[in-house]
Amino acid sequence: MRMIELNILAILRDLEEGSERREKNACDNSQGNFSDVTEDCTVITGFMIITNTNNTGPTYEEMTKMLSNVEEIPCFAVIAVNYKDLAFLSKVTKITCEEDYFRTGTSGLIYQNENMERIGMPNIKEIVFNEKGGVTEGIFEVYNPKLCYDMSEIIYFSKIRWWYASTGLRLCDQKGDACHNDEAGVWTDEDLPDNCEVVTGGIMLNEKSKNIGDKFKAKLVPIRLLYGTLYIQGAKIDELVFPNLEVFIGFAFYQPGFAVIGCPNLSKISFPKISVIFDTYIDDASFLVLENEKLSVSEAACNRWTSVGAVIRVETNAANCDGESDVQYLDVIQFESGQTGSSNSSNFGSGSGNGSGSGSGIKANKIKKLYSDNFHVE
C-alpha cells in the first residue's frame, strides 16, 4: 500500500503546481481556495482541492455556507480534513473533469481523513471526462479509518460504477470485524480471520488449499458483505455456504468477480440471504459456475442469482439451472437493483444439464425493495 500513498502524494504536488497556472473566476476553485465562491454558486470548474493539512482551511460551517447550493463540481481531492462528512456537497449531481488530472481516469480522491465518518454525497448521477487516460471514471476512497457505510449506500455507489473503496470498508451497523488483507489483497484458507462481517479484497481457494474443513466453513458464517473476488478453482471443498451473506460486489477490473470452477467434491453452493450480486467492471458473464461434476444447480438458484443482479454462466456441472428445486431463496427481502442479471446457460429451466452458453436465458424477476430514501436513483 506504500506505493499507492507515494503515487497519490506525487499527483497532488502536480495538481497544486498546476492550479497556479489556471484561470480564476467567481465560481471557480481552480486555485485551490474558496475565497471567490459565492453562496449562490451552483457550478464550480477547474480542479477542487479540499485540504486542511496546515489547519488553515475553511471550517465545516464555512464550507456548508459556500457550497450547499453547488450541483456540479470538477475533479476533486479531499485530503486530511477534519470534517465529519461531505454533506456540504449533498446537492452535487454531476462531476465534470476538464482533464485527466490524476492520470488514471479517476475523478475524485478522498484520502487520509482521520475524522470522516460518512460521505454524504447521495445524488451523484453523472461523471464526464473531456480527456481520460485510465480504466475508470471513479472516485477512490482510501485510508479513512472512521468512515463507514450503510449497506444500501455501498450498493448505490457500486452500481453507479463510480465509487471504489480500495483499502477496505466498514458497515456502520456491523458488530463483527471488517477484514482487509493489506499484504496479499485476498484471503485464503490459511489466513482468513474469524468473525469477519465484511470482507474486502476477496477469498481465494485452489487445488493446494488444505484448510477447508469445518473450521474454515465456520469463518464464512458471519460474513454479510463480500467486496472484491470469490475465486474457488480446483479446491476439494465439498460445500460453499455463506448463511448470512447479503451483498456480493465484484471488484476485479478485467476479470469476473465470482468464479467457482472445477471443484471435484463440491456438491452445494448456498447464500440464502443474498440480496445483491453485482460486478463493478464486468457486464458479460461475471458470475461463473463451471465444471463442478458433483454440483447440481437448481432453477430456483439461477432465478435467484439473476434476479438480484448476477450475469451468470452455469455450464458443465451435474445440472445447470435445472437441478432439484430448493427453497433456500424464498421470502428473502431484496434491494432495488440498477442492473438485472441474465443467464448464459442454454439449458436454463430445461435440458440435459450440459449448457453451451449460447441461450438467451430468462427475464430477471423484478426486484422489490427500494434503496434507502437517502438515495435517489432514476
Image (cartoon, rainbow, N blue to C red):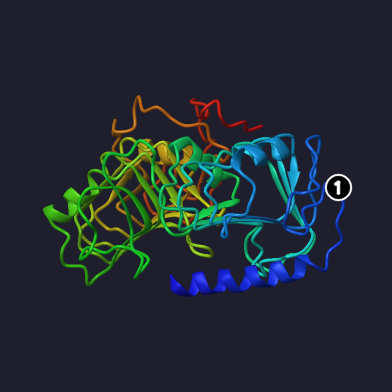
Residue toward you, 20 or 127: 20
Classify residue 205 as left or right of residue 279: left
Q: Is residue 77 above or below residue 87?
A: below
> Dot 1: what SS?
loop
Decide: is 197 above or below 212.
above
What x and y, as percent, mark residue 54? 57, 60
Q: Which residue is drawn at 69% across and 72% down?
A: 14
Residue 189, percent across and down?
Answer: 22, 63
Residue at x 83% of width, y 46% of height: 27
Crowd rating for badge 1 (residues with CA inside 10 Å; few <14, some 14–19, many 20+): few
Identify the residue under disc 1: 26
Q: Give coordinates of residue 142: x percent, y percent.
A: 49, 58
**Residue 124 makes an appearance in the image:** no
Comparing 274 with 167, the one in front is: 167
In which quadrant of the rendered view does residue 183 lie? bottom left
Q: Nearer the viewer, residue 274 or 46?
A: 46
**Residue 294: quarter of image:** bottom left
Locate the N terminus and report the quarter of the image it occupies. bottom left
Residue found 81% across the figure and 51% down from its top: 28
Q: In which quarter of the image is the C terminus?
A: top right
On the picture, is 25 further left or further right than 179?
right
Three-letter amino acid code at the position of disc 1: Ala
Q: Residue 283 or 127: which is nearer the viewer?
A: 127
Q: How many discs appear?
A: 1
Residue depicted at 61% across the width and 44% down the height: 59
Location of residue 166 with respect to 297 vertically, above or below: below
Instruction: Mark yes or no: residue 233 visible.
Output: yes
x then y, percent, for residue 107: 66, 57
Q: In this view, does 35 lie to the left or right of 331?
A: right
